[in-house]
Image (cartoon, grey):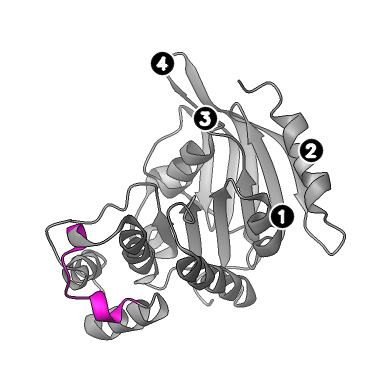
Amino acid sequence: MSDVSHNIKSIETIKIAKSYGRNVAVKDLSINVVWGETLSVIGPNGSGKSTLIKIISGITRPDSGISNIAGMDISKSNNNIRRLIGVVTHDTLLYKGLTGFENLQFAARIFGLDRIEERINDVTRKMHLRELLHAKVGALSHGLQKRFSIARSLLHEPKILLLDEPDSGLDQESLNILDSIILDYSRTQHSVLITTHNIQRAIDLSNRIVIMSKGIIKHEEDIDTSTNYESLRGIYSTCTSDVP
């Protein structure tokens, strides 16, 4: 990781806030992820998880506060930041009329990548998609489209993955592939921020868990061998008891 410093946090937000009309999505939220760490953010629908991902990835600008990627202000987004992050959102953002190969080729050209076919072969092999490369994306199931979306996020070999409920709509084979990628990222001193509803998967994959509700952090906990699902589930219920 020669182009970034381990002394700088991979992800850092400082009192970010975002509202949509009268609806407060995120309120004065400060969060950080260090290199080699996987952080899971769990919370009910409407808790602000997706807004957090959108702000950190630069898709949405906060109303106030600062969001940094590897020490760089995301509001001054440039190619250095874009090359560091791989993003998976609820919307696959794939062109349904194009094949999987064409979608990945288009993304690779936007990033100005070299060895495009080699990279496509590599990520589709990881996601077990090689046999579907030349099928129209629109003809594939939602789960397979999600796999192509994940493949696209890996295409430029990002050092940080931002995954917004990537497990939604995936079958068990796809989940196993995704989990393997997330665990590999942690082992190679890359970083992952993942939002999920699945408490057990968060325990299995993460170094740390944050519980969000109504746009704020209600609980934060390091994951170790003593972490217990039932205990964390109880904490989750308490933290979100005011959610209808």
How far is disc 3 from disc 4 in space, using C-alphas?
14 Å
Instruction: Mark 4: give few (<14), some (14-19) or many (20+) Cα within 10 Å.
Output: few
Image position of 209 with respect to 186: above or below: above
How far is disc 4 from disc 1 in space, using C-alphas?
32 Å
Q: Please name which of the two marks, 4 or 2, marks the residue nearer to the observer.
A: 2
Q: Which amino acid does label 1 sit on?
A: Arg
* Residue designated by label 3: 46
Q: Please name which of the two marks, 1 or 3, marks the residue nearer to the observer.
A: 3
Instruction: Mark 3: give few (<14), some (14-19) or many (20+) Cα within 10 Å.
Output: some
Instruction: Mark 1: give few (<14), some (14-19) or many (20+) Cα within 10 Å.
Output: some
* Residue designated by label 2: 235
Q: What stretch is highlighted in magenta?
A: 129-138
Q: What residue type is labelled 2?
A: Ile
How far is disc 2 from disc 1 in space, using C-alphas?
15 Å
Q: In which quarter of the image is the C terminus?
A: top right
Q: Hey, which quadrant is residue 88 in on the image?
A: bottom left
Q: What residue type is labelled 4?
A: Gly
Instruction: Mark 2: give few (<14), some (14-19) or many (20+) Cα within 10 Å.
Output: some
Residue in the foreground of this view, choosing between 87 and 196: 196
* Residue designated by label 4: 21
Kind of element beneath mark 2: helix
Q: Looking at the image, tell me whether mark 4 or mark 2 is earlier in sequence order.
A: 4
Q: Looking at the image, tell me whether mark 3 or mark 2 is earlier in sequence order.
A: 3
